[in-house]
Each structure stands twice: as C-alpha cells, then as structure tokens.
Amino acid sequence: MTQHLVVVGGGMVAQRLVEALRDRDTAGTWRITVLAEEPRRPYDRVALTSYFSGRDADDLALGDPELWSDPLVTLVRDDAVTHIDRDAKTVTTAHGRTEHYDHLVLATGSSAWVPPMEGTDLPGVFVYRTVDDVAELRGYVEKLSEDRVVKGAVLGGGLLGLEAAGALQALGAKTTVLQVGTHLMSAQVDLGGGEALRRLINQLGVGVRLNAMTTRIRPHRRGGVGRLDLADGGRVDADVVVIAAGVRPRDELGRSSGLAIGERGGIVVDDTCLTSDLDISAVGEVACIQGATIGLVAPGYAMAEITADRLLGGTSSFPGADTATKLKLSGVDVASFGDAFGETPGALEIVWADPVGGVYKKLVMSDDARTLLGGVLVGDASAYASLRPMLGRELPGDPAAFLLPEGGGGAPELELPDDAAVCSCNNVSAGTIRGAVTDHACTDLGAVKACTKAGTSCGSCLPLVKKLVTTELAAQGIEVSTALCEHFALSRAQLYDAVRVSGVSSFTQVIERFGTRADGRGCDICKPTVASILATTSPAHVLEGERATLQDTNDHVMANLQKDGSYSVVPRIAGGEVTPEGLIAIGEVAKDFGLYTKITGGQRIDMFGARIDQLPLIWQRLVDAGFESGHAYGKSLRTVKSCVGSTWCRFGVQDSVALAVMLELRYRGLRSPHKIKLGVSGCARECAEARGKDVGVIATDKGWNVYVGGNGGFTPRHAQLLAEDLDTETLVRTIDRFLLYYVRTADRLQRTAPWIEDVEGGLDGVRAVVMEDSLGIAADLDEQMAQHVVEYEDEWRATLEDPEKLRRFASFVNAPDTPDPSLAYVPERGQSRPATAEERDGASPTPHHEPVLVAGARLEVRS
C-alpha cells in the first residue's frame, strides 16, 4: 500500500530529500507532497549572489525539472503550512489546504535574524535570504543609482555578509561592512586569517569596520535610510542597509504542535532525524541535531539522505556535521575546514603568511604533526579541494609543503583513500568517483557528475573530481582525450606545432591537412583557436579574407559587445602614460558620440555605448589623435600596468613607466590562448600590483625581478618568482621566451597559472626552457618574437584604410545609415547608461548623440 509523505518547506534540503527518495523507492512505496512557502520550485540558495551577475532566478533552480513531473510527486508552491494536528496526522495551509500524512518531514529552514533596534523597518533595509530579497535589493539600489552614488552598509561580516557586500559593490554601491567582532568570518577563520581577509576585501573597494556595534538606523529627511549610529558614538551614512547578522531556525510549527525544542531553538531530533513524535522528522537548518542547529547545506543534505534511507527501512544515522565552508566572492579566495581553531588538545598549528600578497594559510595537525585536523586558507584556497578530504588522515611528508605557493613547495601528491569524502554536499567519496569510471564507463567529467552528483551543488570539489577521473582513466589504460574538438584529434599545443612546422596559412588548409572530418566547416571551438594560432605563425589582419569568419564575436568588430547590443572602445594607453592632449582627444570623442566613460583597472579609458556604424568614425578620430587599438576585445596582450617609478616617486629605484611602455609596445597584438596582462613596479612597495599579473616585473637596486603566472578572474593566483636582478636586456629576452612558450604550448583558454602547473616540472620546468634553453628552442623563440615586433599592424588603422573591411560596419545591410532603434539610454551621474526594460516602457529615454565630425574626419560608411 502506498503511503503519503508530506514535506513542509521547498528549499534545497527538501529537494534533496524528494530526489533521494524517488531514486531509491523503485517500488513506489511513498507518494510525496511538498508544501512550499515560496512561489518557485527549489533553487540554489548557496549561489544566490550570482543573481546579481546577470543570472535569472530560474537559472538557480535545482536538479532535473522532470522530478516535479513524477506522478508520485506533487509540489504545491506559494502556500505555507500554518498548523499541524498530530493526533489527526494532518497539516493545514494558509490557503485552506489540508493534507493527511503517514509521515511528516519539517524542512522549513531558517530565517534572517534582525536585531531588535530602531529603524529596521525603514525603506532601504533588507535581509539577504531569498530570491525575492535580493531582487528587491537590486531594484532599490538601481533606482537610487539614477540620482547619486549609493552608499551601502552591511551589518555582519560573516559568509553571507561578505557575499552581500560583493553584491552591493557589483551594483555600483560604495559599501562598508560593519562587523561586531574583532575580525571577519570569525566563525570560520582565526584572527590572522581575518586580517588577511580584511585586506582582500578592502582591495575590492569595500570598507570594513571592526568592533562596530550598530545601535540604531536613522531615516533620511527625504525618506528611507539615512545613517547608522554606532555604540562607540560613531556613525555611518547609508542609503541602503543589508542585515546579515545571522539566522534563526523556523521552528514555529514545531513549537506550536508541542515538539521538543532545543535550548537555542530548533526542533530536537535524534541521529536518524526523528523528532519527539516518531511520525515526524526534521531536516536541515530547522533541526537541532546532536545539540546544535547547523546553517550549512552539506549537513542538511546528509539529513535528507538519512531520512530517505530510513523511510525505506534503512538504518543509517547522522555521522556528524561537515562544517567546511568556502566563500563565494569573486576575487576573494577563502576556505575553512575541520578544527580550524586548533581546539583539539595538543593540536599543532602550521602557518604560512604573505601579508603583501594577502595570503594566509594554516593547517591544524595532531601533536605528532602527522594527522590533518583542520585548516584555514585565505587569499589562495587552491589546496582546499585536495586537503579537505584528508581530514583525520595522515599527510605524506612535511605538512608545511602543502602551504607554500603552488609549484614552489614540492608538496607530495595526495592519494585519496576510497572512503575519503570528495563532495560533502552530495556525500560522494573518492571510491564512488573511481567506480563511476571503472564500473559505469564514465569517461569524462560531465558523465561522472551525472552518475554520482559530485560537483553539482557548490562546485568547490570539481578540480579534485576532474583530477580523480583523469588519474583513474590513466590507471585503467584508457586514453584521456586531449582533442581540441570533434574536428581535430590534436590538442591545441599539438596543432600549433603542426601548423608552425607545415607553414599552412589558412583554416581551409589546416582542417584539410590535420582535421578529422570532411565537412571542413569547423566549430565555435576550433575556428577561433586556429585563428589565434595563425595570428602568430602567419600574421594577417583579423578581417583578412577567410580569417574574418574564424573570429569570436568581439574580434569580428574589434570592439567589446555589451549587454544592450552596443560596443565599447578601448584605445591603447601604453603603461598608463597619456598626454593632456590625448586625454582631451578621448574626452572629446566620448562627448561627441555620447559615450559612457570609465577608467579601467589596467590604466586605460573604456568608452561604452557605441553603435556598430559609429565604430569606424570613433576609430578615425582616435587614430588621428595618435591612438591605436588596445586589443581589449582579443585573447592577446591587454595592458602593462605601471606605477610612476623613479621618475616621480621618492621610493622608486627604476624607471617603471619607461619599461612598461616599451613592453606594451613590444607585445601589443600578440595573440595567445587567453588574455595576457603585465605589470611593472618601480620598487618593492608594488603599487602596480605586478604579482597579480601573468608577467610581473618589480624593480630592485640591482635590476629587475620577474614573476610569472599571476592571474585574476575566477581562480585568482599569485605570481611566482622566475628570476632575480636581471638587467633590462636579459629581462626582455626572458619575457619574450616565456610568452611565446606559453602561446605555443598552452591549452585553449588556459591562463598562465594553470599552464605552469601543467608544464613538466612546473615553474622549474618553465625556468629551464626560457632561461637555460633546455629544449633547444630559445633561438627560435627569439626570432619569432622579433618577427612579431616588426610585423605588428594596428587593426583599427588597417581597417580604416580598406573599403572592403569597412563595409562590415553598418546597422542594417539594406539601410546602412539608419541607427539601431533598439538602443536606448537614460542619464545617470552625468552620463548615459542602457535603459532597463521598465524605463523603455515609461518615459522616453535619452537618445544617443549623433557623431560630430571635426577637421580630419574623412570616413564614409556605405553599403
């Protein structure tokens, strides 16, 4: 006989429970009804901040949507349960629905805690808990931004508070985090880690105030939030406040129905997740298990799996909470796991810190320094995926080796036992992943994810999962494919060598000679890759003949496509050095074409909002003023950032500007597997942030130190020292060889940091090639770079001089002089930005200025 399971709550843990039960209940023993308070199906609350980076709320939905089409599953949305009748075994909802249950699971989660103080009900005060919360926050900030620079404040410096601060900053708000305690993320990291984290957060442009207790939120005279009063007598001006001061379990249904409640809240459950009523379970953040409520998703998933197993007659029980956490904030890498505070008797703490680089790492070991008990990683959490599964196990070799920068410490390879937990969110072990390869014929990462669910939640374990898959395939004698795509069996590096040696100079020749398919058309993977290879082996304009069909979207028009369909234009400003006349020229172009201007992090000026038909007109003005393409649109050299060096700075020991200009002019237009950035600092104070660049140069009294492999982006990396005290000639030769060795051998879209790790011997292997000529290719690399310097051509100027290339730049083929009517703008802080959908439907937006031609403007664009 089919029984009825009622699940109260429609969050992540509820979704996992339903998924687990349906996967195992092949006999259809249970019919499931989920009663959800929110109006949407379960979504990934862990990834809530990604909603601010352009993702739609539907993109956060969890799992396979087919789950909710299962005839044994009913999802009722937007209808909260208000009453439980334990005697009748029924629940009643706000809309009057009554459901009888054979077993009831409470998965109501938690709610944001709002401190009891004046002003929390003011317009502009938000919590950060649901999609609706963040949607309202975004709308409020965007509305205020129309009139002024918004000032934001976040109450709480924990995981959620820092993510909220990152979201506010992404919306353009000038944000301050107010933390009651002595350091950020005090529940996860120690004081040393908190201080390193504060510096990283400051570098993002977010302010931090510690030991800051807010006592009142005061209104502004125009309405809404105006300022925060602090206990120490200080104040913080704010237009918007996000409260991220903690959560409280949603245990009101348990309380009202007489279930046992924990001392600090939460519905008390045993290790099988049963409450004091054996017909009712509680899972996730609402459950008080082993004396505590746990606000993390992994323990909640474990409870869901246990409950599903027990409902089908199993005997599994809660093993204890995995409290490992990882901050999900772009540009800030933080992880904490195990006994992070060294509270185990006799525990030893091994710490490695780089205050300049903003890196702090700590491992907590047993008293014999063998067994890993926990760790804190700030600024570089790349070792997190490998170390966390080793909790409670002996580390091979010296534990300190695992804290040193990658490629520099000689850390031994970790061989995970089969029972080591790799994906704590989904309780997937290393043995399960290996079994997916050996027993279920999963031969790539996607197949393993689908088979095991590893890496399908927070994703922090994916590097380790991929490594395990690759290693197991190799151990089974299964060839691990490095093919570029279905059209080429060669890897990018192999294809590069084949093209270089053969001398072929077109895509047609490349695919005919080295391709695997007869159709000869290629795909979105191989075409831009071949274009990049040909750019260094057989240089030609990106729009020359067949090559025009190979480029990515941005390269097609030599400008960056923006969200509204317009383009941005970035002229080169070598080393960040520009004359007053150059600044005036850029300003006049932006003014005449109504472009939004912004200073980039690479010391250039970005101009947004150009129509495609305006691009040649803008280029002509810039070229006439002495500028050229900054290649902001290409996988190539972007910028060489510099400080003012010895020319102006009283601390400078070398002329960093002159070197930066020379390097940028030398490597401009160099196409590569990924974008390349350089930095030159005139002294060890490092104002150009050179150690965050692919190649960083720092002046010394004796010459130059060169660092390589620094990357920003999704996985920030700190550059590693390649060589010290080089004279300028040797420095340039070293950089020449490093860049071309990377261009020749890196994988498609591979940054320099992971490329160095893949090179045999790591950084030492790279050093041997570029400085000791271990492969005997140094002369070839020198010659190729010399050829690149001689053959460089500005793509903007070349396009302006070719009528055939200019024919591409028109709004409509049948009406080339007609502006694109879909582009609409509104004023903001003295400039124009793209209108939102609501603004398009309302008042007429501000039109873009038509171009104002000046003396020397000689361009015509015709169909």
Image (cartoon, grey):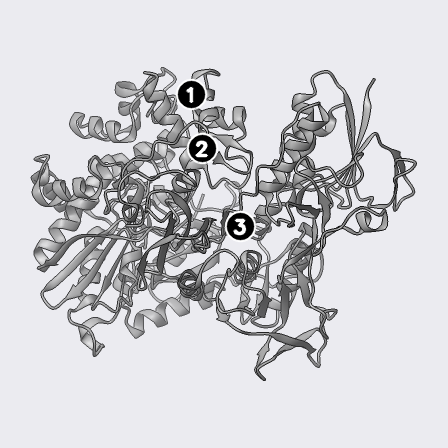
Q: CA distance from mark 1 to mark 3?
A: 37 Å
Residue 450, image x, y percentages: 53, 26
Residue, disc 2: 420
Q: Nearer the viewer, mark 2 or mark 1?
A: 2
* Residue that appears at 76% across and 44% down: 39
* Residue that appears at 46% across and 62% down: 851
The one nearer the camera, 693 or 158, is 158
Residue 714, image x, y percentages: 42, 47
Q: Is residue 300 visible?
A: yes
Q: Secondary structure at mark 2?
A: loop
Indicate the amino acid at tag 1: Thr
Mark 1 touches mark 3? (CB < 8 Å): no
Pointer 1 local density, CA inside 10 Å: few below 14, some 14–19, many at least 20: some
Indicate the amino acid at tag 2: Ala
Residue, disc 1: 443
* Residue that appears at 18% across and 55% down: 706
Indicate the amino acid at tag 3: Lys
